[in-house]
Image (cartoon, helix red, strand yellow):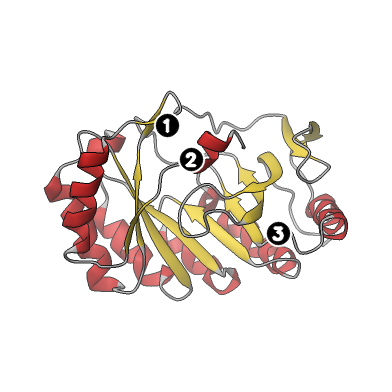
Amino acid sequence: MLHIPAADLIEVFSSLQGEGELLGRRQVFIRFAGCNLDCDYCDTSFLSKSMCLVEEDSGSGALVEYENPVPLERMITLLKQWLKTTPGAHHSISITGGEPLLHAELLELWLPHLRRLLPVSLETNGTLPAALRLLIQHLDYVAMDIKLPSVTGQVTDWQAHADFLAVAVQTRCSVKIIVGDRTTDNELMRATQLVHDLCAATPIILQPVTRDNKVAVSVRRLLALQALVSATHSETFVVPQTHIFMGVR
């Protein structure tokens, strides 16, 4: 590991997964800096900083500062300590961001070492298929987004999502679609058909936008969207950001 580059991280902590297919599983979250999108609903800064926040004692909530970039050796030592003090507690490691695939070349070196400790799950916006190809053999789960223009305020790159899915299905993949009060039936069905045509068994998770710690889409509308998607793709779920309600990171 002496010649493996260090990583520019935002935070490292142990918590419960609050979204998607691994909802409720306890994970080690390694959050990378940087994002290639600028979505309207996102109010989080993923800019690189000189220090990252690290929860040295698993589950304590107490954060200390590590200097960036963080060496892999230091991360391995921390995770081994967590596995010793909380044996069996953690399901997997979540590689998240921002957009972690911006660091694909570094992750290609990091992931084989991390995966010796726990399975690895990638959380991604699903727009960088070439980067995913570098890493797919080192991943156990891929949780990808399909970004709808009504929510992001940007044009959706449908071809990038299709190319990404074609790689992601080589491992256990789920697709999250964030929906808001302006989400149209047409754009949602375009995303649904894309998933269904490429990977009919892959779960689709509809995640309502959260504002002020509350679901910002009515139950009536969520039920209508779920019914619309399920008519084509039966593996469809509605899962809000439950970590917000629980008050965890």
Q: Residues within 10 Å of mark 3 (few under 14, many from 20)?
A: some
Q: Residue furthest left?
A: 186
Mark 1 in CB contact with mark 2 (< 8 angstroms): yes
Cα–Cα gap, marks 1 and 2: 11 Å
Residue at screen point 16% across, 55% down: 228
Alpha carbon separation for disc pair 2 and 3: 27 Å
SS of the residue under disc 3: loop
The residue beneath circle 3 is 90
Q: Is residue 143 left or right of residue 215?
A: right
Mark 2 and 3 residues: CB-CB less than 8 Å, in contact? Answer: no
Q: Looking at the picture, how far across and down is residue 94, in whole percent?
A: 61, 54
Circle 2 crowding by C-alpha within 10 Å: few under 14, some 14–19, many from 20:
some
Q: Earlier in the sequence, mark 3 or mark 1?
A: 1
Q: Quadrant of the N terminus?
A: bottom right
Q: Earlier in the sequence, mark 2 or mark 3?
A: 2
Q: Secondary structure at mark 1?
A: loop
Q: Can residue 149 be seen?
A: no
* Between 12 and 159, the one nearer to me in the picture: 12
> What residue is pinned by disc 2?
35
- Amino acid type for the residue under numbered disc 3: His
Quarter of the image that includes the C terminus: top right
Dot 1 crowding, Cα within 10 Å, few <14, some 14–19, many 20+: few
User: Residue 90's image quarter?
Assistant: bottom right
Which secondary structure, mark 2? loop
Q: Mark 1 = which residue?
A: 42
Percent of width and height locating residue 211: 39, 27
Report the amino acid beneath label 1: Cys
The residue lying toward the viewer, choosing from 220 and 125, is 220
Q: Nearer the viewer, residue 194 or 247?
A: 247
Q: In front: mark 1 or mark 2?
A: 1
Q: Considering only order in the chain, which callout, 2 or 1, is on the residue closer to the N terminus?
A: 2
